[in-house]
Amino acid sequence: TKQLTSLYQHFEKDFKMGAAINQRTMYSSEEVIKKHFNSLTAENEMKFESVHPNENEYTFEISDKIVAFAEKHQKAMRGHTLIWHNQTSDWIFEQSGRLVDPETLLKRMKDHIDTVVGRYKGKIYSWDVVNEVIADEADKFYRDSKWFQVLGESFIEKAFEYTHLADPNATLLYNDYNESNPGKRDKIYQLIRQLKDKGVPVHGVGMQAHWNIYDPSLDNIRKAIEKYASLGIEVQITEMDVSMFAFDDKRTDLTEPTEEMKALQMERYLQFFEVFKEYKKHIGAVTFWGVADDYTWLNDFPVKGRKNWPFLFDENQQPKEVLKKIM
Ligand code: XIL
């Protein structure tokens, strides 16, 4: 049989091919990672609560291991994520049992960014600086978060400024989900446009791309990429997975995907990669939020305990049929 070429080598001239890994999957999927990907993201290990559990305590053991793994295999490394409303230690928002004052919060934020970005300076080519601050609701612009409550929208530009100072060569992204939804993509566009107008160092947008076999439409994906690219910024696909379930599907009884699901997923993957190639001028990297179907965060989200099969590699680390067709 014909030897399957490598995914990242196939797209080397177009964009980087990435995968999120954790301290377990970097070993269980090591062969697939080595062969098919040239960019890695830590799934949880660089998040605030993982590296900065207490004010005067930074814990870099696991993130260091992941960065060392990337270096050993000569893979580029992305950073995820600095400022987010989730997986962020409570202490940063507290001061003598009350909500922290703005000045103190900014100081703590700067310390966090200086320390984390500084530690990996020159080793991380792109940071997801600010994650998910735009609201999903049509009548609301920003998400309500502790960051927002204390600092208003100013925390966003500060985060980019501090990150740029800590590593001037890294590509700095604003990252979000539902990024192809018409209402939300307009708000994301406006946010980045305002930042750019003010001269804030934002260099790109991360489209998380938590998609499924039905949604979003190719048309909405194209429009999102075009709209973001019209700002003259880089677009990255940062957390791609293609769930077998529609958004409102709550079934938990499937132990394997149906033939129909598999066929639809193959068709969708082919279409997505056609779109990525079409816009390759604007796309710097396409990263999956995992490697192979034996492990995905979608096994617990949004329906607890439901198995999913979102990737290009199956539960046995074997490429799905669609891989040959993509390349
Ligand atoms: C997810 C991880 O995959 C899970 O392991 C964790 O329990 C929750 O976070 N958007 C993001 C990612 O930016 O950080 C999230 O990752 C998925 C949604």
Image (cartoon, rainbow, N blue to C red):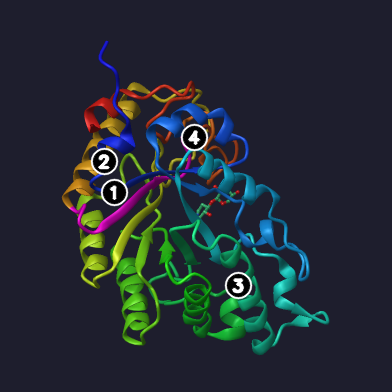
Which structural element holds mark 4?
loop
Q: Quadrant of residue 257?
A: top left
Q: Amino acid at mark 2?
A: Phe
Front-most of 106 and 75?
A: 75
Q: Earlier in the sequence, mark 1 or mark 3?
A: 1
Q: Is mark 4 within 8 Å of ligand 1?
A: no
Q: Is mark 1 within 8 Å of ligand 1?
A: no
Front-most of 85 and 246?
A: 85
Marks 2/4 in contact by CB < 8 Å: the verdict is: no
Q: Amino acid at mark 1?
A: Phe
Residue picked out by circle 2: 11
User: What is the spatial separation of the Cα atoms under label 2 and label 3, in whole angstroms?
Assistant: 34 Å
Please provide percent x and percent y for residue 163: 51, 73
Front-most of 219 and 172?
A: 172
Q: Earlier in the sequence, mark 2 or mark 4?
A: 2
Please provide percent x and percent y for residue 146: 62, 76
Horizontal side of 171 relative to 26 (left or right) equals left
Residue picked out by circle 1: 15
Pointer 4 local density, CA inside 10 Å: few below 14, some 14–19, many at least 20:
few
Residue picked out by circle 3: 114
Q: Amino acid at mark 4?
A: Arg
Q: Give the answer, above or below, for where 178 lies relative to 135.
A: above
Q: Residue furthest top?
A: 1
Pointer 2 local density, CA inside 10 Å: few below 14, some 14–19, many at least 20:
some
Residue ID at (62%, 76%): 109
Residue 85 shows up from this direction: no
Q: Amino acid at mark 3?
A: Asp
Over which residues does the magenta segment extend? 279-291
Magenta run includes residue 83: no
Residue picked out by circle 4: 251
